[in-house]
Amino acid sequence: MFILYHTCKYLSILLVVRNSCAYNKWMQEKKLYRSRDNKVLTGLASGLAKYFNVDPTIVRVVLIILEFATAGLLIFGYLIVSIFVPKEPTK
C-alpha cells in the first residue's frame, strides 16, 4: 500500500510538471542540432554538448573513449546520426 501511494503521488507530480507551460516551452526550445560554429568534424559533438548543457570537450573525450571501447564501431553510428541530425538554423 505504501509503494502504491508513493507511485501515485510521483505520477501526479509528473503529470502536473509535464502539463505546465514552462515545461512545454522548454521542450519546444530544446532540439538537437549539429553546431555550425563550434565543429571539428560534423558538429554533432558540439550539438550534443549544447543539448545537454555541458562543455563540448567533455563530449568529445567521452566519444573518443567510447570509440576505443567499441573497437571502432562507434564511428559508423556517429556518421549515421550526423546524417539524420539537422544543422543548426542560421540566426
Image: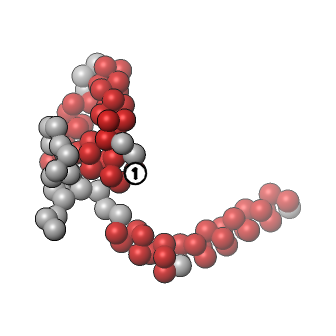
The answer to whether residue 84 is visible is: no
Is residue 11 or residue 42 the one in the foreground? 42
Residue that sits furthest to the right in the current view: 1
Q: How is the image coloured?
A: secondary structure
Q: Residue at x 25, y 26 (%)?
A: 73
The answer to whether residue 34 is visible is: yes
Is residue 59 or residue 91 the one in the foreground? 91
Measuring from the top left, give residue 68's x and y in whole percent.
31, 19
Q: Measured along the vertical axis of the image, is residue 10 above or below residue 37?
A: below
Instruction: Locate the C terminus and report the quarter of the image it occupies.
Output: bottom left
Measuring from the top left, give residue 22's x and y in whole percent.
48, 76
Helix, strand or loop status at disc 1: loop
Q: Measured along the vertical axis of the image, is residue 9 above or below residue 86?
A: below
Residue that sits furthest to the bottom in the current view: 21
Name the residue carrying label 1: 53
| Quadrant of res 89 | bottom left
| Quadrant of res 46 | top left
Q: Measured along the vertical axis of the image, is residue 20 above or below residue 31?
A: below
